Structure formats: C-alpha cells, structure tokens
Image (spheres, rainbow, N blue to C red):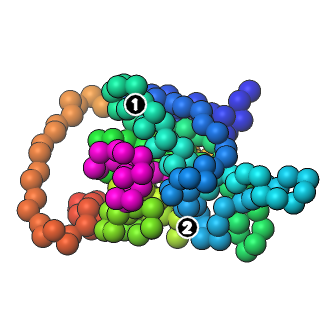
Amino acid sequence: TLGKEDRVGRMVKGLMTGLGYTEVLTSSFADEREIFNCSLWSDEGLLDLRDPTGRVDRRLRGSLASSLCHILRINAGYKERMEGLFEIASVYHREAGKPREKMCLGIVSPTGLSAVKGAVERVMDAVGLSAVCDIVRGEHPVFREGRGLAVVAGGETIGRLGEMSDAARSFYDLPSGVAAAEIDFSALCERAKIDRTYAPFSRFPPIQRDLALVVENKVEWKAIAECVKSV
C-alpha cells in the first residue's frame, strides 16, 4: 500500500504531465557561476560541503528554479522547443544557522506567470487544498519587482512563484516572461485531502453562464472570488 506522500506524488506528477509539463531530474549541487542560486526559503546562504582539508568543495542548491532554468537553456541550445518543466526533489538551506533539507515541487514555464499560477492552482485543487490556500502578493529578489506571489495556507507560506528577474533571464539567455514556482511538497502532503467522497449524479443537466466584470487594476482576484462565493 502506498503511503500518503507517494500517493500525492503520483497524483501531482500525473497532473503536471497532463498539463504538458515534462518531468526532469537535476543535480543537487549548485553551480557557483550561477547568479540564481538563492534560496526561496532562507536568506542565510547556501550550504557548503567541505573536503577532508576543510576547503569548501561544493555547495548544495537552495532552489529548484536554477536547475530547471539550466535545463531550459540546454534545450534551447539544442534547438528544442521550450516547454514547461517540473521536478520533485530536495533543496537545502540554513534555518537559525542549522542545515535543513526540504522536499519541494519546482515548476518553470517559458509561457509566463499566468501559466505557472494556473498549474499551481490545479495542483492545489487536485490535492483538496484550493479552499484553504490563497495566492497573494509576495515579493522576492529571485522574481521581478511586482511579479512575485506567495502561496499561503493557514497563515504559513508554503510556496512562492513569479516571473524571473531580468538578471536571471539574462544569465540563462532566456526570453522575457519565463516564470517559476516552488512549493513545499512536504507541507503539501501533510495538508492534502486526497480521500474522495462520491455522490450520485444530479438528475438535472448543468447550466453554465459567463459573467463579465470590469474592475480597476488594483482589485485582486481574491477579492472578486470572495465576493462571488459570499452570494
């Protein structure tokens, strides 16, 4: 019998593949030449690995986004069509000076922030968390100013997403609009509600109607959704 984490993993992988994303497996080591190795979970720097003489030999990655962007650059070099990528793997950071390992879901898309946000929302819906998770504004140096978001559940930030900064795009020689997301997969599994309750089909056919709204640019989708749900 599969454990909950394995079940959620299979569910998420199947969903992401169905959305057109390709699963990849990347190295856990950070490339020192890369400027996009900062952790989305800590500002205390990367974890050093030292050789027997005490010299820093390698560093562990602090984010899956840098690894996924590296794959995008390689694919572009081979004239491959740039498509969305995802990976479920560990990232490493310091917390109060102590090393920590976190299992995360990383997503990168060349088609923009809307595509990544949509994928994150589909993941949250698939694991039964759409009702308790909010995607709110959340700036981070990895992302362009004004183009960063945070995934919040129960007052805790369990993920970040956004359009990559100009510096990161320039380094990887990627087109504008490339966006990435990183979700705490362990927190996702812990909160996931994957047991389904089934009910008989309704005897009445469904009715769908489109509703168009005109609002000011400063109005966030969350406010609109809450207004509709309150009716």
Is residue 99 something that shows in the picture?
yes
**Image: 12 above or below 220:** above
The image shows residue 93 at horizontal and vertical percentages of 68, 61
Q: Camera-side residue: 178 or 167?
A: 167
- Say which amino acid is labelled 2: Glu
How many numbered markers are drawn?
A: 2
Q: CA distance from mark 2 to mark 1?
A: 39 Å
Q: Camera-side residue: 179 or 81?
A: 81
* Quadrant that contains the N terminus: top right
Magenta-tinted stretch: 164-188
Q: Secondary structure at mark 2?
A: strand
**Image: 1 above or below 5:** above
**Image: 194 above or below 78:** below
The image shows residue 124 at horizontal and vertical percentages of 46, 47
- Nearest to the eye among marks 2 and 1: give it: 1
The label number, if any, that marks residue 156 in the structure image: 2
Q: Camera-side residue: 164 or 209?
A: 164
Which residue is label 1 attached to? Answer: 77
* Quadrant that contains the C terminus: bottom left
